[in-house]
Image (cartoon, rainbow, N blue to C red):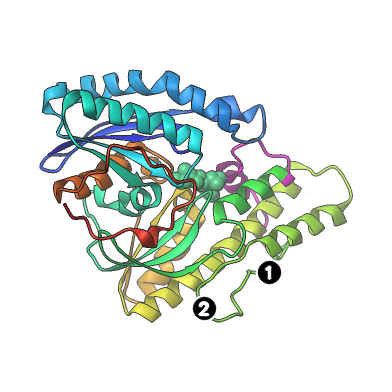
Amino acid sequence: MLVLGVESSCDETGVALYDTERGLLAHRLYSQVKMHAEYGGVVPELASRDHVRRLLPLVREVMADAGVARSDISGVAYTAGPGLLGALMVGAMAARSMAFAWGVPALAVHHMEGHLLAPMLEPQPPEFPFVALLVSGGHTQLIKVEAVGRYELLGESLDDAAGEAFDKTAKLLGLPYPGGPELAALATEGVEGRFKFPSPMVDRPGMDFSFSGLKTAVRQAVQAMDKELTRQDKADVSLAFQTAVVRTLVIKCKRALDATGYKTLVVAGGVSANLALRAALEEATTARGARVYYPALSFCTDNGAMIAYAGAQRLQAGESSASAVQLKARWPLTELRVPQA
Ligand code: KG4
Ligand code: ZN
């Protein structure tokens, strides 16, 4: 089964073709980062308009890359939430229109299910069941995953998401948007030990997260310096911030592995591209005879491939979405069910 996937939930237009026999055939991504950088964050209306401009050319390109004709495509999957409603609407309408014109089913995909299943695109995919740490700009969640559609929430952030904490801290340090990767890059120049921030929530039981206190600690440390920060100051703060976040994420992942008894950890979402987090999780899982899996770096952040893959799993089971488009700015992952016709 050959599925066209469309992602447009935020500031990236992603299109991909996934075949359940042959794997990922082609994928293309257009990032609007430069456009939004001028404003220091995503401007929803501009995002929607740009998806309109980019989407269909990207569809043409992936079809040409993969050498497939319209008649080869057996279903179209699109992100239906969570995300920016206007941006989602562009992808949904384009996807549904193509499916209608081609006489194939269309399927609404949950963006976070896309992230969660992205490691399945790797040559050595994880096997069910596993614990998933979803760390993106909007979510920080630990999920017990028994199968596609069988998700149990173990813990989540009570305030900011991990990616959001990275972005806000980067903004505080005057780093360009999008802050997460910038802060992570600068942290490699940081001197360890100059700043020490508390790792939020590690002394409390459970698997929930909270990052707003850490954000405040960083702001206070910056204010206490009372001067124009040098590159080294920023690097030192970045390193201490990243260390605190990573420590929290690692401790909660260990708790989730303990609570479930699972030996497999999957990490996905934009922050899973963070190399310090990867190194720390690698060490923590190896030490307990467990294994950690990630998507390829290019599929950690938003992309069409993960939507094509997640959609294909559900379309293959005969699932399709009613023709009235229903989009959700908020949509708990645990509302999803096992794929069924
Ligand atoms: O999954 P994603 O592309 O979009 C959402 O669904 O939110 O995640 C984007 C988030 C942003 O907050 C970005 O700063 C963060 O992921 N991010 C990183 C890194 N790369 C992306 N955070 C830390 N280190 C990175 N290397
Ligand atoms: Zn995302």
- Of the numbered discs in the image, which one, if any, rests on residue 206? 2
Q: Please state if 281 lies on the left or on the right of 47 as rendered.
A: left
The answer to which of 89 and 209 lies nearer the viewer is 89
* Highlighted range, magenta: 172-192
- The amino acid type found where label 2 is placed reads Gly
In the figure, 302 relative to 259: above or below? above
Q: Is residue 11 visible?
A: no
The answer to which of 235 and 170 lies nearer the viewer is 170
Q: Residue 38: percent from the left, percent from the top?
A: 66, 26
Which residue matches tag 1? 198
The answer to which of 221 and 165 lies nearer the viewer is 165
Task: Based on the picture, tell me whether residue 304 belongs to the magenta stretch.
Answer: no
In the figure, 85 relative to 112: above or below? above
Q: Is residue 151 visible?
A: yes
In the figure, 55 relative to 265: above or below? above
Going 41% across and 21% down the picture, which residue do you hit? Answer: 54
Q: Residue 60: percent from the left, percent from the top?
A: 27, 19
**Dividing the image into 4 quarters, which one contains the N terminus?**
top left
Judged from the image, the secondary structure of the residue bearing numbered disc 1 is loop
Q: Quadrant of ligand 2?
A: top left
Task: Based on the picture, tell me whether residue 176 belongs to the magenta stretch.
Answer: yes
Q: Disc 1 versus disc 2: distance between alpha carbons? A: 17 Å
Quadrant location of residue 41? top right
